[in-house]
Amino acid sequence: MANEAQKALIRRLDLVAKLDNDDREALSRLPIAIREVGAGTDIVSEGQRVTQCCILIDGFTHRYRHTFEGKRQIIAFHVPGDIPDLHSLHINVMDHSFAATTRSKIGFVSHEAIWSLCLARPNVAAALWLETLIDGAIFREWIVGLGRLSGKSRTAHLLCELAMRLRSVGLAPDHVYCLPLTQHELADALGLTVVTVNRVLQEFKLEGLLDRDRSRMAIKNWPALARIGEFDSDYLHFRADVDMKASPPTAH
C-alpha cells in the first residue's frame, strides 16, 4: 500500500499527466524515506552534491539564493506534492538552497530508484519531465512579474498562484488557505521591502479583496485580485480534463 509520500506524488502527477494504473502501482512501490524538518532548516544547501530527490508531503518550503552582500532572494515556493529538486537528477550539484519555510514532512527517494522507475515506466518518465517544464514555466512567470509588474500586481499574482496550487491538492477550499509566510519572506520573494508588502496587504484588506489573520489567508474577491495580478493559470499546465470545479476561475 502506498505511503503518504507516494500518495502525494501520485496525486501531483495526476494533475498534469495521464498515468495508468500500472504507472500508479509502480509509483506506489518507490522506496521513500520520510522525516520531518524544522522551520528554517536547509534541506539541501547551495554547492551540495545530492543523490536523492525530495517530495513535500506536508508543510511549506522555498528555494533561495543569497547575493554577495548577503541579501536573500526567494526564487520559488512549494506546496504538498511538489518535487522541488527534481532537476538534481541531471544537475546534481545544487546552485541554490532549498529550505523548510515551516515545519515540514519530506519524503526522500534516491536518484537510482527514480532512474530505475523511469526506465521501466516511460509514461512516468514523461510525467516527471513535464514537472520540470512546469517548474520552468513558473520561473518565467515570476521573472516577468519581478521585471514588469508593480509591487501591488506582483503581490496579487503570488497570492492567486498559491491559492490555485493549494486548491489543486485540496488545501484551499472557498479561496481560503494557510499562508505561513512572514512579511519578510514575502518581501524576499517579491523583490519588495517589508514596508511595501505591509502597505499592499493593508490596501487589499481595505479594498475588500482579502482578509489575513496570522497564517490564514482568505481571498474575498477573486476576480478583482486576479485582475490586479494579471493572473492567468495557464502556465501551471493542469490537465484540461482534471476536475477543477472547486478552483477559482481563471482571469483573462
Image (cartoon, rainbow, N blue to C red):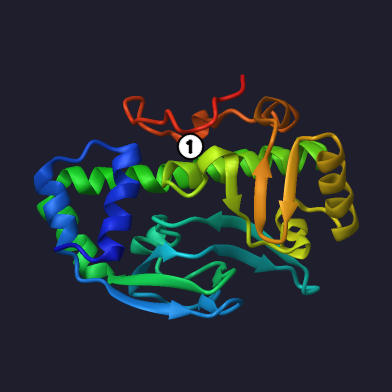
Q: Which quadrant would residue 222 be assigned to in this image? A: top right
Q: Which quadrant would residue 46 be assigned to in this image? A: bottom right
Q: Is residue 186 left or right of residue 173?
A: right
x 90%, y 57%: residue: 195
x 29%, y 42%: residue: 14
Say whether residue 140 is visible: no
Q: Amino acid at mark 1?
A: Leu
Say whether residue 211 is visible: yes
User: Where residue 168 sits: x, y (%)?
Assistant: 44, 41
User: Where residue 91 sits: x, y (%)?
Assistant: 41, 63
Along the line of sight, the residue nearer the viewer: 84 or 165: 165
Q: Is residue 158 left or right of residue 136?
A: right
x 87%, y 39%: residue: 206
All told, the count of numbered labels is 1
Q: Where does label 1 land, which residue?
A: 236
| Quarter that holds the N terminus | bottom left
Say which element carries label 1.
Answer: helix
Above or below, 191 against 222 in this view is below
x 40%, y 58%: residue: 83
Along the line of sight, the residue nearer the viewer: 177 or 194: 177
| Quarter that holds the C terminus | top right
Above or below, 95 against 207 in this view is below
Q: Is residue 115 left or right of residue 60?
A: left
Q: Which quadrant would residue 123 be assigned to in this image? A: top left
Classed neighbour count for the residue bearing mark 1: other residues with Cα under 10 Å, few (<14), some (14–19), many (≥20): some
